[in-house]
Amino acid sequence: MFSSHADYRKLEDRARRVLDPGVFDFYAGGSGDETTLAANEAAWGRISLRPHVLRDVSGVDIRTRVLGQELAGPVCVAPVGYQTLAHPEGELVTARGARRAGALLTVSSRSSRRIEDVAAEAGPWWFQAYVLRDRGLTRELVCRAAAAGATALTLTGDTPYLGRRRRDRDPGLIPDEIFRVNLGDGFDRALAEQASDVTYDDIAWLREVSGLPVVVKGVLRGDDARECAAAGASGVWVSNHGGRQLDGAVATAEALPEVAAAVGDLVEVYADGGVRTGVDVLRALALGARAVFVGRPVLWCLATGGEDGVAAGLAELSEGLAHAMGLAGVTVIAEITGGLCHPAAGRNNVEG
Amino acid sequence: MFSSHADYRKLEDRARRVLDPGVFDFYAGGSGDETTLAANEAAWGRISLRPHVLRDVSGVDIRTRVLGQELAGPVCVAPVGYQTLAHPEGELVTARGARRAGALLTVSSRSSRRIEDVAAEAGPWWFQAYVLRDRGLTRELVCRAAAAGATALTLTGDTPYLGRRRRDRDPGLIPDEIFRVNLGDGFDRALAEQASDVTYDDIAWLREVSGLPVVVKGVLRGDDARECAAAGASGVWVSNHGGRQLDGAVATAEALPEVAAAVGDLVEVYADGGVRTGVDVLRALALGARAVFVGRPVLWCLATGGEDGVAAGLAELSEGLAHAMGLAGVTVIAEITGGLCHPAAGRNNVEG
Amino acid sequence: MFSSHADYRKLEDRARRVLDPGVFDFYAGGSGDETTLAANEAAWGRISLRPHVLRDVSGVDIRTRVLGQELAGPVCVAPVGYQTLAHPEGELVTARGARRAGALLTVSSRSSRRIEDVAAEAGPWWFQAYVLRDRGLTRELVCRAAAAGATALTLTGDTPYLGRRRRDRDPGLIPDEIFRVNLGDGFDRALAEQASDVTYDDIAWLREVSGLPVVVKGVLRGDDARECAAAGASGVWVSNHGGRQLDGAVATAEALPEVAAAVGDLVEVYADGGVRTGVDVLRALALGARAVFVGRPVLWCLATGGEDGVAAGLAELSEGLAHAMGLAGVTVIAEITGGLCHPAAGRNNVEG
Amino acid sequence: MFSSHADYRKLEDRARRVLDPGVFDFYAGGSGDETTLAANEAAWGRISLRPHVLRDVSGVDIRTRVLGQELAGPVCVAPVGYQTLAHPEGELVTARGARRAGALLTVSSRSSRRIEDVAAEAGPWWFQAYVLRDRGLTRELVCRAAAAGATALTLTGDTPYLGRRRRDRDPGLIPDEIFRVNLGDGFDRALAEQASDVTYDDIAWLREVSGLPVVVKGVLRGDDARECAAAGASGVWVSNHGGRQLDGAVATAEALPEVAAAVGDLVEVYADGGVRTGVDVLRALALGARAVFVGRPVLWCLATGGEDGVAAGLAELSEGLAHAMGLAGVTVIAEITGGLCHPAAGRNNVEG
């Protein structure tokens, strides 16, 4: 399903046909002229690979450890909100598919199913947290997630407010009953919006109230990554929110080497954005990511194939990674280093 | 209206429909093959941004000071001549719209409304001066501007004569009565053409006769910028006249870093050319501009929406800037530095 | 026939018309999104040449020595499997055409005619070996090749298993009787598949069992090339398997300078991938190749013109090389050096 | 006529309509895939210009000296053979047009009018010489040229034989009576073909037999340029024969800076290839050329407008140069230096 970008385009087209146009555009779209959205996909393709020959690749093993947790592989599920728009059972189905594929799941703050219900279906999972205008609500949500078994929090750091997304035509796309699934009934909806005054100090606060390690999502700079580490984060997640926040922001494939170089072994580094094939996953690992998250591909699988679709899509990506590793002459994740990338890949790095 | 280049294209198309084709082409066109015209827009898009995460951006403030004058924001109106071709009341309407948006206005020497009448409608404004063949007339115009309240003169330095603009099909496009609005009735029209022997010495002369600070517009090189400073200019304005003079001239986004580096704090630096969105404004500020001027966008707003259009268009650009600043993690203009640009942006710099 | 890429496209189109669509796609296709397939051709075109003037080029001589063997020229035939799919007599015809053109031939392990029968028609030839799951079979094949007169073995190092080729629609394209031509009748087909545990140690083993020098095909990195030399290889062949293995792998024209620089005079260097004209051959020699192999062009000649087609196509490439050498001001192969390439050609090198 | 590439394309289209298709293609075509032909035009466009502001450009003077001879400007006519194919009076008309425009003319060895007759119509002119297989004939031709008033010889150094030009469909395009115009009647036509053993030694020989300074045409490398100087040349002419010899050869705009840097003040440097506008001429001068030669544009003028066309076309290019100089802030040829080019222009230089 994901052995080529051409196949991904077909999957996306199938999703376009089964989804309500407004819903499809809500998920598929980016901000502004969608230049960052397009740049994400294109940037991986510019990274040529330097495969090895004559290595014994009869046993390729993609297992890895993320925040100390052993995972079947580095392909993980990015947080996507309001999944009942795409499938009647929404996040429950994605959780089941991810569990079958052995993929780490991230559950969104904007889940349209109750956190506890999703958790009941999930394998290993993280909770994606916004710091909301109401800090009490924020605390409640992350504590519920911790209680339900989340092993880490992902603090989204790039969304003090939403980017301007031209394809979001319908302000009422997210009905109140979906928005409120994880809120109390009488809760003032505005207080559940993202706060615009979130800072590095909130890393320690979230860690303290939840007892969970915190990963900052949306990091695109080495200096910010180091600040996250200094403020107590356990990981940084290179992301531009799938091209949905600042249009013009650097592609994640271009930001990743700088971030990885900046933090070294201080904290773990992950990435998302435009990853469509196992070869793209290999590129991201080679540029310094320990795990790679996919959002839209999983959503299109959910919309077109339900649980089986999600499981198969994730398995395909993992198999594509293993296949590409063998062809590149590496057999375990630890052997995937920057030397697999042709130097042109580094030409846009800060250090380059 | 300007949150994306796609929206700008729509605005331009609306203007094309309401304007006489010859008038539209007069404003839209550039010189030669219009390569510089196209390069201006494209060059901003090549500058990837490096937003910060986890900054308190609950209060974004775009106020700035230009030549000591406090402005509501750095988005300003570039000089555009003969605006009655685009709207019956021409510059008067633009002045009202700019004042409502709190935007610094530049009034063209080629204004088709009397300088004093425009001034009466304007908020803060500068007068764009050509040194004309008749220096007496030049002196008269700049003195009238000073008397009418202009706070600075912009000396256009890139136009010893007009570029060759293929879309200017009709040599009689500018009727005598429009050309003469700010001249005496019996004045020899040829003497009101730009002089081709203008030099750095004219900076001091204009300053002396008008009593106003002088900004040189059209600067594309660091050495010229330093010469302007040495000759008494208070600012340099990076511009290629909207691609209307030397076709093949460097895009302003590519020239701006060199100019900014060359002058340091000696004089202020501004820029125009192909700026279409708040993100473009952010890029220009990051590359060293203190203020950013827009011409064609304002004209299309004038033609399609009159005073409301101008006010709304300028407000939209300012809001777009504030929005982009928040997403980039900066809250005041002073925090916008070159570090917001991905290094690839600098690859064409003289120093790079 | 090959004096331009346009002519090559016409030849390919003729082949498309005479071949079964599944067979055409099997040969024409690459893996994944076929980005490496496309990159191979494009990369040669980016290498500008710096011809000399005023050299006596009245006698251009393209003779060369490869592994000590004098050849009529550096244009050689790459291994292509199952050629009876393209012509009833398959490899026999290619062998005759190559012999007429004086071109070194590589006979594939996947030959659809018996090795000995092909050898009987061939001029100088090499045997392309996979190390198969059954090492005994591997030994038998290379010994048969040596006995039949092969002067070297080419060990394909980039194929622990096949790449994912979207155009290979029909898993039954290669019928059992074609697959088995060089196997015993009762042989378990699976054991004749490539082994995925082939290592540098197999170089010495193949050399020992066959008594022939070994060339490693598929090398794309300088470090691997040095390892091949250290392990006893006599040559390294820069190849990405015609874009059929790891999609995303670097184009051969981009990898060649690194490999050539890494091995210096230790071992010989060859290249294939996207070479379509005599000028492309000249570029490959300038970047460090001693010989250049062509696969698809020969196959299209076979399909459209049989023996005459193959002989004419190879002759045309050699004449194109000689023609280009004269225009570049060089008369013998030894004069072709990196200085013939414009520096931009090196901009993607590891050392660059 | 030449103030933009768009205008040039229109001129070319008019020529296509009035000329026999085979004749048009003979002139318009290049060798191989015509990549060098296309690269020539494109390369000038990549050179951004850095105009000065505030210079007194009321008097722009394009006069220059070439080999000690004062010329009205640096725009010159490149040698084009067999011009009676394009106009009944052929070279006579071109000579008259060039004289009216004050442009230095180069008369081709392949002139279809007698050298002496062309000379009678010409202003300042050079003779383009091939060293032919018959050295006696070569000597005779250059001596006739010297006697008829040529002030220099241009030795074409890039044509030991013709490139492979796919558009040259008709081997009989040049009839015997045209080919023989400057030969004796009984002369063996093959002996009048270019020799392929021409070397730097022929520079001194031509100089000696003709008594004229010798310029080598076709130089694309700094080392060759220095060898030309050492061998007694008075100038080197950067050219790839309009993309008609080695396809893949570097664009002249990319080779020019290297050649100019290599020879310094030893010899003069000229350039041709894809120059279409006055801005292109300015770029070539900025990159180090003392004079710029145009071929196809003049031929299209000849075909579509005869003497008036040639005169007007050349005047337009010179006026375009003067116009561009003024807009760039320079008033005499000597002020045109490499600093007018944006650094990106130098990114492909050998030294860069």
Image: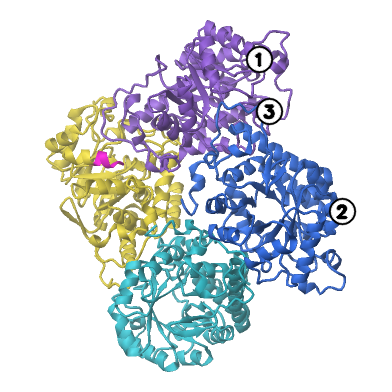
Chain colours: A purple, B blue, C yellow, D cyan
Residue C40 placed where, x, y %? Answer: 39, 47
D237 above or below D40? below
Q: Which residue is mark 2?
A: B89
Whether residue A142 is visible, yes or no, is yes
Q: Which residue is mark 1?
A: A134
Q: Is residue B286 left or right of residue C14?
A: right
Residue D153 is a magenta residue: no
Q: Please give the label number shown on residue B278.
A: none
Q: Is residue B289 left or right of residue B114?
A: left
A288 above or below B334? above
Mark 3 vs mark 2: same chain?
no
Mark 3 vs mark 1: same chain?
yes
The span shown in magenta is: C220-225
Residue A108 placed where, x, y %? Answer: 58, 17
* Front label number (3 vs 1): 1
Chain under disc 1: A
How far, Cα to Cα, is label 2 from label 1?
Answer: 51 Å
Q: Amino acid at mark 1?
A: Asp
How busy is the neighbourhood of tag 1: few (under 14 within 10 Å), some, or many (20 plus)?
A: some
Secondary structure under the numbered disc 3 in the rendered image: helix
Q: Amino acid at mark 3?
A: Pro
Chain under disc 2: B
Relative depth, front residue between B12 and D334: D334
